[in-house]
Amino acid sequence: MFQKILIANRGEIALRVLRACKELGIQTVVVHSTADSDAMHVRLADESVCIGPPPSRESYLNIHQIVAACEITGADAVHPGYGFLSENAKFADILAAHNITFIGPSGDHIRIMGDKIEAKRTAKRLGIPVVPGSDGAINEDKEAKRVAAEIGYPVIIKASAGGGGRGMKVAHTEADLEVALQTAKSEAGAAFGDDAVYIEKYLQKPRHIEVQVFGDGAGRGVHFGERDCSLQRRHQKVWEEANSPALNAEERSRIGDICARAIADLGYSGAGTIEFLYENGEFYFIEMNTRLQVEHPVTEAITGIDLVHEQIRVASGGGLSVRQEDIKFNGHAIECRINAEDPRTFTPSPGTITHFHTPGGLGIRVDSGVYSGYKIPPYYDSLIGKLIVHGRNRVECMMRLRRALDEFVVDGIKTTLPLFRDLVGNPDIANGDYDIHWLEKYLAKGE
Ligand code: ADP
């Protein structure tokens, strides 16, 4: 087991990882920018190292500074959290070259899945169902038109290097296609420094369903069931649940088994998420994330298994603590992402939190790094906390969620809490009857 883990992240996820390390008796080091000197993860860690000024590229994305912090403190492993360097293959390789363990998959696996065209090709080879579309990158209008005619309109043009819901353009007819292709290519080039794009069928009313997987790096793979993350705004998840209200037990184990087998065949190590769109009883792979996800606590709530403990175990060579047959799904869980944003326009609302009071009681978990008097720096993601609620079934979970949202107080800034208070009272949400466009339509109506 590791002696000391360096956490290369900030906010609620840095604290989340720190908690797991403490439970396992592992020393912790955190790195932080000058804007985060007062952050909770800095206060609670055994050691902290300031690695640079507020902009991420000079601190949380600064590989040299992070490696130097490992050497100075003698950390033998790095947990990257999500975002920042968590899917940076070069970072994983550099750590390996310094004999520091990256708590995550190999650089090669990160590289494959980070290139969405290659990821899709790999998924197909592993027997995972994919969205119909081009086999590789599309460069010419002629080629785009041929593929689109073959799969049928509407189609979506996506950046191979895309992420965070950016770099996607929909074309409803052939007349839209040329412009969509050119815009997608130039946006992808500007945003990701790689203008490779591909085409796939645009599904009209899908749900976003993702499977939590784990590999032990030695040919064993398991799945921890799925999460439904269909409630999205601008392709960003807002509310996540496990299990999906749309799947039955047979579909759950069918897709779970396909994913677990693929992970085993790949020789994958650590946590991963295989993302699908789901429509009319069919699953279509869209991408794989090679890290812990923001929404992992809903899976922890229904399985009772700490996924960060598992990540640390696997990375240290101790293997998984569970076999597939040990993983049981118990009840229902929902996570609400609490952002420092206007609940309608989603404009960021940084500032000082004058009062912060979290709900409690059976089945309630709040993962957050903020506190009363905390000043939210304007430089980073607006996520300030996650409320995760568990109940014996979805009805109980929703009842408890409504109560927990009523108890939650965040004063001094705007947050997305009022949106969730509206959503728990909505009949479609109560029935679990929503697809990936539901929230955008709801917000557009201004209900
Ligand atoms: P990113 O890596 O940027 O998050 P994804 O490929 O995971 O991109 O897609 C993000 C979201 O975009 C999906 O959850 C879905 O809402 C939408 N999307 C992606 N591909 C399609 C498609 N083929 N049809 C319809 N919607 C799609």
Image: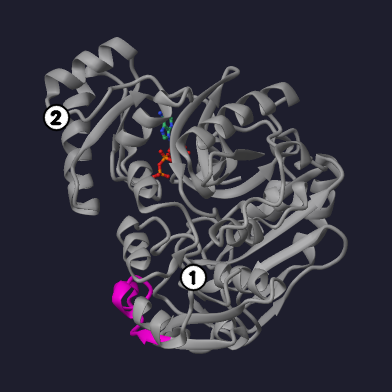
Badge 2 element: loop
* Residue in the image at 68% along x and 35% along y: 244
Return the x and y of residue 285 as percentages of the image width and height: 46, 29
| Amino acid marked by disc 2 | Asn
Q: Which quadrant of the rendered structure holds the N terminus? A: bottom right
Q: Residue at x 23, y 35 (%)?
A: 197
Q: Mark 1 touching mark 2, by CB under 8 A?
A: no
Check the image and report above or below for 221 versus 134. Answer: below
Residue named by callout 2:
139
The image quadrant of residue 59 is: bottom left
Residue on which the image places disc 1: 77
CB of residue at label 1: within 8 Å of ligand 1?
no
Which residues, given as a range, are shown in magenta? 50-65
Q: Is residue 269 above or below residue 434?
A: below
Seen from the viewer's position, the closer of residues 312 and 158 is 312
Q: Residue at x 28, y 23 (%)?
A: 135
Task: Determine whether 198 is above or below 318 in the image.
Answer: above
Seen in the image, is 130 located left or right of residue 5? left
Mark 2 or mark 1, which is nearer the start of the sequence?
Answer: 1
- Between 151 and 346, the one lying in front of the other is 151
Snapshot quadrant of residue 162: top left
Q: Is residue 271 visible?
A: yes
* Type of amino acid at the residue the image marks with label 1: Ala
Ligand 1 position by quadrant: top left
Judge left or right: residue 267 versus residue 161.
right
